[in-house]
Amino acid sequence: MCGGGKTTESTDRDSLSLDSEAFMTAFAKATETPTVAVTLSPGVVLMPFVDDVEAVLNVFLAGASTGDAIAAAAFGDHNPGAKSPVTFPKSEADVVAPCDDLACEYSEGLAVGYRAMEDMEVNFPFGHGLSYTTFNYTWSAEPKVGTDGSVTLSATVENTGDRDGAEVVQLYLGFPDVAGEPPKVLKGYEKVNLVAGAAEEVSFTIDAKALKIWDNVAWNWAEVAGSFDVMVGSSSRDIRLEGSFDL
């Protein structure tokens, strides 16, 4: 079953619902046939039917070849390897309310998107995306602070399934509590294409400036002392490797 949503420039959407949400929800609940929901959306949408379908294929706004892309992914001719750039919430109450005025005040500060929703139940987290194969992560080199203040680390990603596929390895950082930062901050990502059974090492370098926070009083970047958490995974909620370092 398929559903879409619409949007326009210069104004917020007044709803996160798909145009055919009521039909899709009723159909998914009533049918006994395994069903995949295909959604075409301008961004985040609600999916009250998510627990009653086998899978959701969201193509956002895919352009002229939308039909070919949907068919290739749904029937397995193409192994999807994309990751969601947004968090799909359970409810509109979990996100910032729309503003229908041209003068809008957004006071959430750093608590935007996945950074604000770490403790919320969501339909699909930031960075999520399934594949027809599976991937295993192991440390190649755990986080290490260099003489220039940067941090280096590397992980080996192995395609453990029987299909060639692509994985987007995501690096998140947890600052010391004193910094007042969100619990997870994306600091890097790397896409690797792996044939079945192959493995590849993925390396990251976090430069010294990326370990600082903005000081509104000094109006400059400030260093943070303490223990930093390092999280490497397949999404913001699917962390495969954890480490730490001290500054």
Image: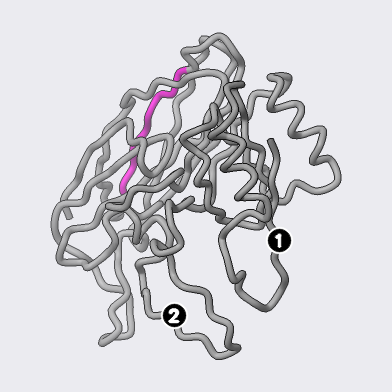
Q: Earlier in the sequence, mark 1 or mark 2?
A: 1
The total number of labels drawn is 2
Q: Tell me the quarter of the image containing the N terminus.
A: top right
Give the label, 1 or 2, closer to the camera: 1
CA gap, disc 1 and disc 2: 23 Å
> Residue at 69% across / 27% down in the picture?
73
Task: Reply above or below: 169 against 199.
Answer: below
Task: Reply above or below: 124 against 119.
Answer: above
Residue 106 - label? 2
Image x and y of residue 154, in percent: 37, 33
Question: Which residue has dot 1 on it?
Answer: 6
Image x and y of residue 221, in percent: 32, 74
Task: Reply above or below: 151 against 27.
Answer: below
> Residue at 50% across / 33% down in the picture?
52
Q: Residue furthest front?
A: 30
User: Which quadrant of the view contains residue 177?
Assistant: bottom left
Main SS type for the magenta part? Answer: strand
Region rendered in magenta: 151-158
Instruction: State yes or no: residue 76 in magenta.
Output: no
- For numbered disc 1, what is the local secondary structure? loop
Q: Are marks 1 and 2 in contact (CB under 8 Å)?
A: no
